[in-house]
Image: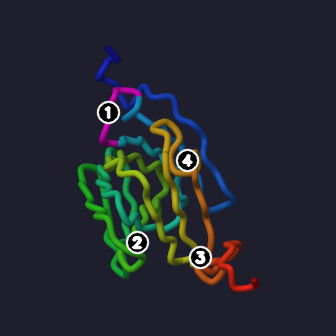
């Protein structure tokens, strides 16, 4: 049996960085402890950074638990200050409920994200106008490691009948 215990402070953090705005040390703990229906990821976000773009999962709910530091949490058009001990709900929804945790302080912001693991999932990114569709998402890599993943914009969508032999040209 896999040991059902992990210590977040002993977790090996994988570096995650894109440009000047997005940076975090991340550790996927749900898979490490053998969780089947829940994902657990530990985030350590440097001062002035955010881990991920503002997004909304159509299928999966997330709960954030602030371990240390301060920052701000945005959901939809509302923003709230957060601090150690705060528990935050990010229910499944559409782009109007998109959420993001930001470290607007001068110290590290550390928090856990606990989420359901419903597959497939659709994720909207309202700030960039894109969406992602993912299926067969591995427990140890997340959305970008899915067997089927597509990231695009609605205006670039193909017609339903594109490439199909409809018999119209016979």
Is 63 placed above or below 34 here?
below
Name the residue: 45% across, 38% down: 139
Q: Are circles 1 and 3 on residues that touch, CB within 8 Å?
A: no
- Using the numbered discs, state the Cα–Cα distance from disc 1 to disc 4 in whole angstroms: 18 Å
Number of marks present in the image shown: 4
Q: Position of residue 131 (x, y in %)?
A: 54, 70
Q: Secondary structure at mark 4?
A: loop
Q: Position of residue 108 (x, y in %)?
A: 47, 48
Badge nearest the viewer, 4 or 2: 4
Give left or right: position of 50 versus 121.
right
Give whichever of discs 2 and 3 has the lower sequence position: 2
- From the viewer's side, name the closer residue of 80 and 144: 144
Which residue of the protein is positioned furthest toward the front in this rendering?
170
Give whichever of discs 3 and 4 has the lower sequence position: 3
Give whichever of discs 2 and 1 has the lower sequence position: 1
Indicate whether residue 25 is drawn in magenta.
no
Quarter of the view holding residue 20? bottom right
Q: Secondary structure at mark 2?
A: loop
Name the residue: 49% across, 46% down: 136
Q: Position of residue 156 (x, y in %)?
A: 66, 79
Badge nearest the viewer, 3 or 4: 4
Q: Position of residue 32 (x, y in %)?
A: 40, 27
Q: Secondary structure at mark 1?
A: loop
Q: Which residue corresponds to mark 3? A: 128
Q: Which residue corresponds to mark 1? A: 35
Give whichever of discs 1 and 3 has the lower sequence position: 1
Q: In the image, which disc is placed on residue 146? A: 4
The magenta region covers 32-38
């Amino acid at each position: 049996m896999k040991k059902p215990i992990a210590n977040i402070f002993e977790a090996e953090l994988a570096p995650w960085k894109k440009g000047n705005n997005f940076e975090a040390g991340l550790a996927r703990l749900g898979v490490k402890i053998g969780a089947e229906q829940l994902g657990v990821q530990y985030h350590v976000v440097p001062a002035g950074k955010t881990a991920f773009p503002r997004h909304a999962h159509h299928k999966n709910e997330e709960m954030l638990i602030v371990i240390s530091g301060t920052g701000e949490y945005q959901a939809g058009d509302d923003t709230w200050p957060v601090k150690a001990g705060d528990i935050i709900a990010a229910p499944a929804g559409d782009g109007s409920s998109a959420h993001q945790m930001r470290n607007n302080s001068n110290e590290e912001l550390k928090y856990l994200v606990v989420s359901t693991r419903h597959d497939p999932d659709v994720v909207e990114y309202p700030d960039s106008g894109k969406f992602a569709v993912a299926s067969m998402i591995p427990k140890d890599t997340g959305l970008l490691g899915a067997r089927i993943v597509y990231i695009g914009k609605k205006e670039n969508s193909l017609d339903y009948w594109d490439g199909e032999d409809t018999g119209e040209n016979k």
